[in-house]
């Protein structure tokens, strides 16, 4: 009898806890698809635009590219060219955009709202006085390279940059050399603000309108050529990557999600520009 007396309350508690369940039906708003337009342009590459359509977060359908869009680029209100479709939602011009020129992008597709955006190609960053020296190996790492150079920031405006390093990799004899990322560490007087893949992003808030000497430590030896790429980017590019970095949570579940920057009127995506200077650290 004692055994029944002690287990009965536990059984009652179990049934109470497991039966307290309420099903709530929520009417979610119908998803209205929009054009998703992405193009990051620079003066060294053919202008290319990727066009797709948005879909509901609950959809399990493959991401669909839009292959019947009309994609046009304007300058100073005049139509420059209509981009032909080259496959898989990619639209390409036969020309490269020009430095310090402003462009307007207009995209239309049947059954979807029109989308548009503007951007420009910034001036190339002014770099000089590159000096590279080897750093002796230690018990923890092999020979590395210390590189310094001067970046002159244009005064009277906000400027935004990213920096990356790479080396030609020829380890695969039957393949063309590819750009293998080289890890870098940024030393004083500045630190990067966020990253995307192997690109380190920062603004000129610490050296606005000044010439500043930047110091890097590159995880590569002087026996291999290392290329340092410094790009000046538009504010839209900077804001997009900054919010994308926050959206990634950095494996911190306590960080609330936020919207990713969008500068496409009537749609979603990014239309931005950059201009890069490449420095070679040779053996």
Image (spheres, rainbow, N blue to C red):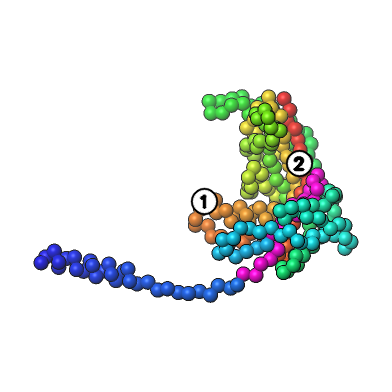
Q: Position of residue 166 (x, y in %)?
A: 68, 36
Is residue 52 toward the left or the right of residue 157 in the image? left
Residue 39 as seen in the image, left or right of residue 142:
right
- Magenta-drawn stretch contains 37: yes
Circle 2: is it few (<14), some (14-19), or many (20+) Cα within 10 Å? some
Q: Quadrant of the N terminus?
A: bottom left
* Viewer-closest of 147 and 115: 115
Query: In percent of the image, x 84 and y 58: which residue is there?
Result: 82
Q: Which residue is mark 1?
A: 251
Q: Residue at x 74, y 57 (%)?
A: 271
- Residue under the point 82% across and 60% down: 72
Residue sitting nearer the eye, 54 or 269: 54
Image coordinates of residue 184 in percent, x first then y, are 64, 37
Q: Quadrant of residue 276?
A: top right
Of label 1 and label 2, which has the lower sequence position?
2
Residue under pointer 2 = 151
Instruction: Tell me how many marks there are.
Output: 2
**Please, what secondary structure does the residue beneath circle 1 have?**
helix
The answer to whether residue 236 is visible is no
Foreground tag (1 vs 2): 1
Relative to residue 111, is residue 138 drawn left or right?
left
Task: Name the secondary structure under disc 2.
Answer: strand
Say whether residue 250 is magenta. no
How far apart marks 1 and 2 lie (CA) works out to 34 Å
Magenta segment: 31-52
């Amino acid at each position: 009898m004692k055994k029944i007396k002690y287990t009965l309350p536990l059984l009652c508690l179990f049934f109470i806890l497991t039966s307290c369940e309420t099903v709530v039906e929520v009417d979610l708003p119908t998803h209205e698809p929009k054009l998703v337009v992405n193009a990051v342009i620079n003066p060294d590459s053919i202008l290319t635009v990727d066009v797709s359509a948005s879909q509901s977060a609950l959809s399990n359908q493959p991401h669909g590219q839009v292959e019947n869009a009309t994609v046009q680029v304007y300058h100073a209100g005049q139509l420059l060219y209509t981009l032909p479709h080259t496959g898989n939602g990619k639209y390409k011009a036969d020309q490269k955009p020009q430095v310090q020129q402003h462009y307007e992008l207009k995209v239309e597709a049947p059954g979807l709202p029109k989308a548009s955006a503007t951007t420009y190609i910034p001036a190339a960053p002014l770099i000089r006085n590159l000096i590279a020296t080897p750093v002796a190996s230690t018990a923890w790492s092999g020979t590395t390279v210390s590189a310094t150079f001067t970046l002159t920031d244009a005064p009277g405006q906000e400027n935004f940059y990213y920096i990356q390093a790479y080396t030609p990799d020829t380890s695969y004899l039957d393949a063309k050399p590819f750009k293998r990322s080289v890890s870098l560490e940024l030393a004083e007087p500045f630190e990067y603000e966020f990253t995307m893949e192997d690109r380190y992003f920062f603004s000129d808030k610490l050296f606005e309108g000044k010439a500043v000497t930047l110091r890097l430590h590159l995880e590569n030896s002087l026996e291999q050529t290392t290329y340092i790429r410094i790009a000046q980017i538009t504010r839209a590019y900077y804001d997009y990557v900054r919010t994308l970095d926050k959206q990634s949570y950095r494996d911190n579940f306590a960080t609330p999600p936020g919207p990713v920057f969008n500068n496409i009127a009537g749609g979603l995506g990014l239309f931005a520009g950059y201009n890069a200077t490449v420095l070679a650290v040779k053996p």
